[in-house]
Amino acid sequence: MKGLKIIVTAVVAIFMATTAVAASPVKTVKGEYTYYGDKATSPAECKRLALEGARLDALAKEYGTIVTQDVLQADRIDSKGEANKFLSLSSTEVKGEWIADDGEPEFEITLDKDDNLVVRCKVKGKAREISNESTEFDARVLRNGTKPGNASTDFYDGDDLYLYFTAPVDGYVSVFLSLEDGNVYQMLPYLSDTKGEAKVKRNYDYVFFDPTKAEGTFGTPDQFRIATAGVIEFNKIYVVFSPSYFAKPVMRARNSMEELPSMSEDDFSKWLVKSRRNDSKMGVRQMNLKIYPK
């Protein structure tokens, strides 16, 4: 079975696209954001994340957001035995896309009491609204069982993970896993799926990642068992569904044919915005998982 191991890092993902489309009118928007760095984050990375946060702030203020209700919080103990408050922000999807900066972003860089970088960014740019009439569907992460009643977002080291899915119309579904290492991994279609697509039928109850409920059209199911590094960890699962076929993002396995294909979370977010812009019926559900050591 494939382990799901998480490495903690700070990542800010922004839904951003740069290609023009004949849709909503372009507006000038402004935003600002302060990024608090640490010793592991370079000055250039701090500035990049502050800029992305400012763009996201501008889009959110102009077009609004869709926010999931999962807010994950826990005390973590680092290698020095110090308690650190770790907060995984509720997932925020802006309902607009960034077209281009209008002038140069403004940065204000200072140091906190521990000599960590604090970067404040102000940005002005061109943006437009994203129109989406997504199709409703039901998706649930299942823990140690394949019934809908096994739905849970709390996991422990060694637990098995499955996914329940059903939709009211025929269509195509993909599943992705976002880890704290800043990468997104493809869980569905399966590695053995030669077609590279998971076509589903309406009103059918699917359970993915379970070999006893294998659907021949999907290939041999990949199986997932949760693994942690001895501390509370977090990851996210994205379920993407559309009545129409959609091209998957370009992902590559870095080490071997048995490793899940992956890409950076930034690139995944850009792919997702582009796909939803081109397909008004595409729906996305994000589920935040909290993983405990035994």
Image (cartoon, rainbow, N blue to C red):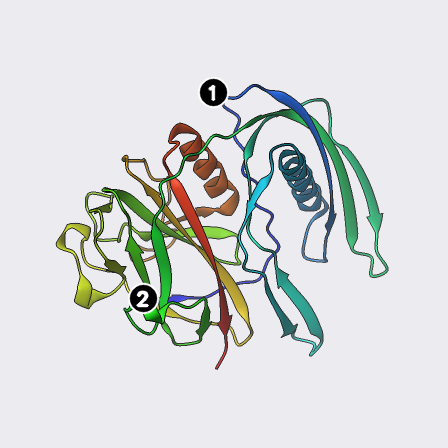
Three-letter amino acid code of the residue under disc 2? Pro
Image side of residue 252 versus residue 88, left or right: left
Figure quadrant of residue 208: bottom left
Residue at the bottom extreme?
294
- In this rendering, does residue 135 appear at all? yes
Q: Along the polypeptide, which appears first: circle 2 or circle 1?
A: 1
Give the CA separation, mark 2 to mark 1. Answer: 40 Å
Q: Residue at x 58, y 41 (%)?
A: 65
Secondary structure, mark 2, is helix
Image side of residue 93 versus residue 122, left or right: left
Identify the residue under disc 1: 21
Figure quadrant of residue 52: top right
Secondary structure, mark 1, is loop
Q: Residue at x 66, y 44 (%)?
A: 49
Three-letter amino acid code of the residue under disc 1? Val
Q: Mark 2 and mark 1 in contact? Answer it, CB < 8 Å.
A: no
Residue 178 location, x and y as percent? 46, 54
Residues packed near mark 2 inside 10 Å, few (<14), some (14 to 19) or many (20 plus): some
Figure quadrant of residue 28: top right
Image side of residue 131 versus residue 33, left or right: left
Q: Which residue is drawn at 57% across and 62% down?
A: 8
Q: Which disc is residue 148 wearing?
A: 2
Residue 284 location, x and y as percent? 41, 45
On-image quarter of the N terminus:
bottom left
* Foreground of the two, 164 or 250: 164
Q: Which residue is drawn at 45% across and 52% down?
A: 286
Q: In this view, does 93 lie above or below 161?
A: above
Q: In this view, does 108 lie above or below 11?
A: above
- In this rendering, does residue 260 appear at all? no
Number of numbered tags placed on the structure image: 2
Residues packed near mark 1 inside 10 Å, few (<14), some (14 to 19) or many (20 plus): few
